[in-house]
Amino acid sequence: INQENGWRRLNVLFTRSRKRMHIFSSMSSTDILVGHNPSRGIKTLHDFLRFCETKIIHKTHYQSNRPPDSDFEIAVADALRREGFECDAQVGVAGFFIDIAVIDPGNPGRYLMGIECDGATYHSAKSVRDRDRLRREILEKLGWRVERVWSTDWFKDPDAILVPIVRELHKLKSQFDFESAHK
């Protein structure tokens, strides 16, 4: 599956069942390290195992290469980086963009949490229902852990907002040390 067309073998395997499929595996989707540029076969196997575990078809998260919407988002991401967490801006999923996606240091192909800020995207939503409850519900069904950071609270006391988020990120991160495994 690591070869260029390895994903095709998996596709054949996954699509030939007519009525039912039973999956037995000695590893879970979290055991497969999906880096920033995985082979298509590795990504396919990871996504399939994740579907088997959750019964949810996860949309692929992708970097949009869009810049952050505001200086506020940059400030939040910079604070998280100082705490040891790398971040991607404007990660797209299911037609939505998450302002800040925090990367799992032990598995760089996985995001620990999405951080929503009350920037331009938030204020341009058509209704409160769309921008708050419905959006969060959709993202959580897709497997995201979502936190909201309000600019007024941040500017008043950023540590009061940052400390609980960092604590939660440490709980969520993989225990595998990616750096030492590749030395």
Image: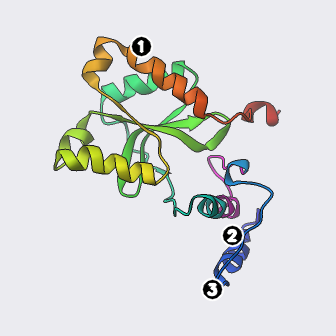
Residue at the location (27% across, 33% down)? 118
Indicate the quadrant containing the C terminus: top left, top right, bottom left or bottom right: top right
Which quadrant of the figure has residue 104?
top right
Residue at the location (18% across, 44% down)? 128
Q: Is residue 172 magenta?
A: no
- Work out whether residue 70 or residue 153 is closer to the camera in this orientation and state it: 153
Q: What x and y, as percent, mark residue 124?
A: 19, 44
How crowded is the residue under tag 3: few (<14 C-alpha within 10 Å), some, or many (20+)? few
Judge whether 13 appears above or below 81 on screen.
below
User: What is the span of residues highlighted in magenta in the rendered image?
Assistant: 32-46
- Give the number of the disc on residue 7: 2
Q: What x and y, as percent, mark residue 135?
A: 32, 49
Q: Amino acid at mark 2?
A: Trp
Residue 67 placement, left or right of 1:
left
Say which residue label 1 marks: 159
Residue 2 placement, left or right of 148:
right
Q: Secondary structure at mark 2?
A: helix
Residue at the location (59% across, 27% down)? 170
Q: Secondary structure at mark 1?
A: helix
Say which residue label 3 marks: 19
